[in-house]
């Protein structure tokens, strides 16, 4: 394989890694935000819940920022086209995401019920809305998006935005993503919380994980009947990256299963995901939150891996001009750029994983509700 | 077809969200370094006063940091949501420093900021100090990579346009990172952040000294900030001069606009305009007062070099525009036919293609192929006029920035002098000036942003991609929706931020509780909610 093609594949895998990191780490915090109003019956309990992820939410959020930066650099045309075609959805996502840092820092700084209640709603919105949007966006991409390019590389949108969120398959994916985040958030609350918060979190998490398993199976069956995309004839993976003048692409039902038929070993990926979704709730039922959390991470790996495995090499197919569908081959950066970024990623990813783990290890242990703020009860 | 209203609204939204984000960034940059300095003193001397100092200013840092992070999220995604052509055109080289910023700096800053706040009990003194250092390092490294990305917009080195992929492709990592503009701007911006933080700490301390509260704490904070601010405000001016010189070398229209040079100068007499009302419509000054013999040495560092004025710059742009139109039409032919002849025609004028793209908005139906021969001169003239940024905005943003920058040196000098003589309380006017100056450095940073970015217009990538061509093809409705949302949300944020900042500054150091007493004056020391503070 040519080096350029290999770099493109490596960056597609790294993109998957980043999206998984985002889903696991940010998803956990979003799950806590979503559950905040339901697991904490009074202010002290809610504050305890917030302080469980208090030292970490900011670092976790960088997965989201890094995801944006990496798509920008490694797949510039995907970044430009997807963020613009999903404009309204992206803006709603941004509005809900930017509520969260402010909510953490400001909520408990004023002792007024209305102030804190308002921010608790902000936590619910900034937890649930982004998770639904992430999932729904993936659901839409699986069905293809209406766009085409002019000769100079500018995109044009061919569909109204409303269809990008409000279709049943996308909503299913959105709820799946929310359920997994509730599962991970609940597991975290169990790790660092005590009764009665512990018990409530356990109930929600088991429910979330089980619902995810159900939706994952339904979604898997549904995909067979969705029009997938496939290249018609040979493709040059090492060609200069441009969506203009690419080879023909066909749309047909079940095309997303082609990779699974060609490489049966890929079936392991959804199997791993489903295993995580079934074993995770069982672990929580057995009061093993740490094990449950890791099984939840496995569920995310399986889910995102399944989508990636089904779509590869496509990233965002076009329903209105299928030959301009964005793929790993035609939407990536140049070889020079991908190589430099890979060097940075190889050096810094292990460092990041190391200090993130250390931070979690350092701040381990139970957080108890207490009446006034302290060094470890800041929020 | 590009809708000009959508472009204008996209620009408005970007300017609003970037300027808003930049209200909080300088304080984060500078205060993180000041916190590291205060904690260093604590670890070396072991005096609890300095721990309290770190914790109190750290609390205000946290309020500011959160909103900086929140509004930074917008910036990372707004290129993609609103500037699709820009992102496609330069993502291969511009996206890279942004990604590296995440990997190298932002992850570090954000992970350790959590430990900085939550880790006092669980970390040894030196380990906590190391954590604070990593937060300061992360914040400032973050600024470095962002400004490397911005440097590429100002002076696109390290990349080459590829007609096969229709974008600029990354060719030289070293050139991108060691771009003169990026390096000078990084130092200028971070030190401007130090000035902002110094003024903030000094001003809040002055407030306590005026009210005779927390006197030991406030006097020491004041002194650290005054000295730090004096050195920083002197340094920031020298780097500003370096940046001005880079504009003279690389972005002459920006320099001409800053200095209000409608005509090429006659050295060495050329006056530096102190006051003027430049009129962009008629290209002349309505009023103008200048000091002769100052401008030439100031900008060129020589007595004999003349500086090209706007008239000369427009003349010089015209041949580039004609060649650029030929380049872009050849590029379009190549994109559609892949004919080697079209490629050869493009290669001949490829370095001027940006000027061809700039002419598109004046062409019939924005199509360069539809320009009739007799219309060409008028289109070239209009395009040449468009290469000049808004003179009024540049002229005044620059002057306000510089005037206030010099004023800060004076304020810090007086403050440091009376602070070192321990006679601050005898000179309440110094304290009052310090207190009322708190917002001024923030304002100056905003002016600096405007000088740099409005002065880059009409380009998003200088000389290569016009801002007009860069925007996403949204409808006006989309833009109204997002703009209204940002305005609503950001207004609520700033109200909450200011309220909390005032409240926690009033409550003062030593306060531990959540403060239902926000409305009442702070309780006296020794009462519940306040720690034991032997140094008062």
Image (cartoon, coloured by chain):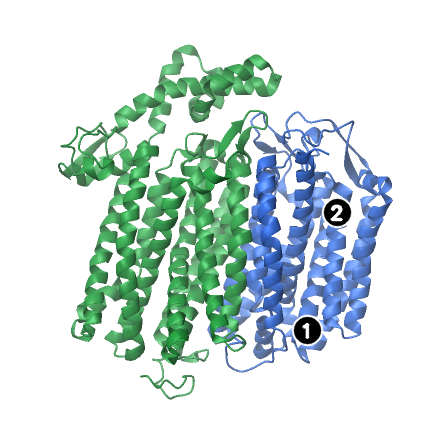
Chain colours: A blue, B green
B137 relative to B275, above or below:
below
Res A163 → quadrant: top right
B66 relative to B279, above or below:
below
- Residue neighbourhood size for the residue with mark 1, other residues' Cα within 10 Å, grouped as few (<14), some (14–19), many (≥20): many
* Total count of labels: 2
Give the residue number, with chain letter if any, for mark 1. A191
- Picture coordinates of residue A373 (x, y %)? 50, 78
B228 relative to A161, above or below:
below
Q: Are marks 1 and 2 on the same chain?
A: yes
Q: Marks 1 and 2: CB-CB under 8 Å?
A: no
Give the residue number, with chain letter if any, for mark 2. A307
Q: Nearer the viewer, residue A176 or B357?
A: B357
Element at badge 2?
helix
Residue at point 75% right, 41% down?
A: A311
- Residue neighbourhood size for the residue with mark 2, other residues' Cα within 10 Å, grouped as few (<14), some (14–19), many (≥20): some
Q: Chain of mark 1?
A: A
């Amino acid at each position: 394989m040519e080096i350029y093609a290999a770099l493109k594949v490596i960056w597609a895998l790294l993109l998957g890694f980043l999206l998984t990191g985002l889903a696991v780490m940010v998803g956990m915090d979003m799950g806590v935000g979503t559950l905040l109003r339901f697991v904490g019956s009074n202010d002290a309990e809610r504050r305890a819940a917030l302080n469980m992820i208090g030292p970490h939410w900011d670092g976790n959020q960088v997965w989201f920022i890094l995801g944006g930066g990496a798509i920008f650099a490694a797949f510039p045309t995907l970044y430009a086209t997807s963020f613009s075609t999903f404009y309204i959805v992206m803006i709603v996502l941004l509005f809900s995401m930017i509520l969260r840092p402010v909510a953490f820092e400001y909520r408990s700084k004023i002792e007024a019920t209305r102030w804190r209640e308002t921010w608790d709603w902000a936590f619910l919105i900034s937890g649930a809305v982004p998770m639904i949007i992430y999932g729904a966006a993936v659901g839409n991409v699986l069905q293809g998006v209406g766009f085409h390019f002019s000769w100079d590389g500018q995109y044009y949108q061919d569909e109204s935005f409303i269809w990008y969120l409000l279709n049943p398959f996308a909503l299913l994916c959105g709820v799946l993503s929310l359920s997994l985040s509730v599962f991970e958030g609940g597991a975290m609350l169990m790790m660092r919380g005590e009764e009665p918060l512990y018990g409530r979190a356990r109930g929600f998490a088991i429910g979330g994980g089980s619902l995810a398993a159900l939706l994952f199976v339904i979604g898997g069956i549904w995909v067979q009947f969705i029009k997938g995309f496939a290249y018609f004839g040979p493709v040059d993976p090492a060609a200069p990256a441009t969506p203009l003048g690419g080879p023909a692409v066909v749309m047909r039902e079940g095309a997303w299963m082609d990779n699974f038929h060609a490489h049966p070993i890929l079936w392991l990926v959804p199997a791993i995901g489903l295993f995580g979704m079934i074993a995770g709730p069982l672990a929580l039922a057995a009061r093993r939150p740490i094990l449950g959390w890791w099984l939840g991470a496995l569920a995310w790996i399986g889910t995102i891996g399944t989508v990636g495995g089904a779509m590869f090499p496509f990233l965002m197919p076009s329903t209105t001009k299928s030959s301009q569908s964005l793929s790993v081959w035609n939407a990536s950066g140049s070889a020079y750029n991908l190589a430099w970024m890979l060097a940075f990623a190889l050096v810094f990813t292990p460092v990041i994983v190391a200090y993130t783990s250390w931070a979690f290890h350092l701040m381990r242990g139970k957080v108890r509700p207490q009446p006034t703020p302290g060094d470890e009860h800041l929020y | 077809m590009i809708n000009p209203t959508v472009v204008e609204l996209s620009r408005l939204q970007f300017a609003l969200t970037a300027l808003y984000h930049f209200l909080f960034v300088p304080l984060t940059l500078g205060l993180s370094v000041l916190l590291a300095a205060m904690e260093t003193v604590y670890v070396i001397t072991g005096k609890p006063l300095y721990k309290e100092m770190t914790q109190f200013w750290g609390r205000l840092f946290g309020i500011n940091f959160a909103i900086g992070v929140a509004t930074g999220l917008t910036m990372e995604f707004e290129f993609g949501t609103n500037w699709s052509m820009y992102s496609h055109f330069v993502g291969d080289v511009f996206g890279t420093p942004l990604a590296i910023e995440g990997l190298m700096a932002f992850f570090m800053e954000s992970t350790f900021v959590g430990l900085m706040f939550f880790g006092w009990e669980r970390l040894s003194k030196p380990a906590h100090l190391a954590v604070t250092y990593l937060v300061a390092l992360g914040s400032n490294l973050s600024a470095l990579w962002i400004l490397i990305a911005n440097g590429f917009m100002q002076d696109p080195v390290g990349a080459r346009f590829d007609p096969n992929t229709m974008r600029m492709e990354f060719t030289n990592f070293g050139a991108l990172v060691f771009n003169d503009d990026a390096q000078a701007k990084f130092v200028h911006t971070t030190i401007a952040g130090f000035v902002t933080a110094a003024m903030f700490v000094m001003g809040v301390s002055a407030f306590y000294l005026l009210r005779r509260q927390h006197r030991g704490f406030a006097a020491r904070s004041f002194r650290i900030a005054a000295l730090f601010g004096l050195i920083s405000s002197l340094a920031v001016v020298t780097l500003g001069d370096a940046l001005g010189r880079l504009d003279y070398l690389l972005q002459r229209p920006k320099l001409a606009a800053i200095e209000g040079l409608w005509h090429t100068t006659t050295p060495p007499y050329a006056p530096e305009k102190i006051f003027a009302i430049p009129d962009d419509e008629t290209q002349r000054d309505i009023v103008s007062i200048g000091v002769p013999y100052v401008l030439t040495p100031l900008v060129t560092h020589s007595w004999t070099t003349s500086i090209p004025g706007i008239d000369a710059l427009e003349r010089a742009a015209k041949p580039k525009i004609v060649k650029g139109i030929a380049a872009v039409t050849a590029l379009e032919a190549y994109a559609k036919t892949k004919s080697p002849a079209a490629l050869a025609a493009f290669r001949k004028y490829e370095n001027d293609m940006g000027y061809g793209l700039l002419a598109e908005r004046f062409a019939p139906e924005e199509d360069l192929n539809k320009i009739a021969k007799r219309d060409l001169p008028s289109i070239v003239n209009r395009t040449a006029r468009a290469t000049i940024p808004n003179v009024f905005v540049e002229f005044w943003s620059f002057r306000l920035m510089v005037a206030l920058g010099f004023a800060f040196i004076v304020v810090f000098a007086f403050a440091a002098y009376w602070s070192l003589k321990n006679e601050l309380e005898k000179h309440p006017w110094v304290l009052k000036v310090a207190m009322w100056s708190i917002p001024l450095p923030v304002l100056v940073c905003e002016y600096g942003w405007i000088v740099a970015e409005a002065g880059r217009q009409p380009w998003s990538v200088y000389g290569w991609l016009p801002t007009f061509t860069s925007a996403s093809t949204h409808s006006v409705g989309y833009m109204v929706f997002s703009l209204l949302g940002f305005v609503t949300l950001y207004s609520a944020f700033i109200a909450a931020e200011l309220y909390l900042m005032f409240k926690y500054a009033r409550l003062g150091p030593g306060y531990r509780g959540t403060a239902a007493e926000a409305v009442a004056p702070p309780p006296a020391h020794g009462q519940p909610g306040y720690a034991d503070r032997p140094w008062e």
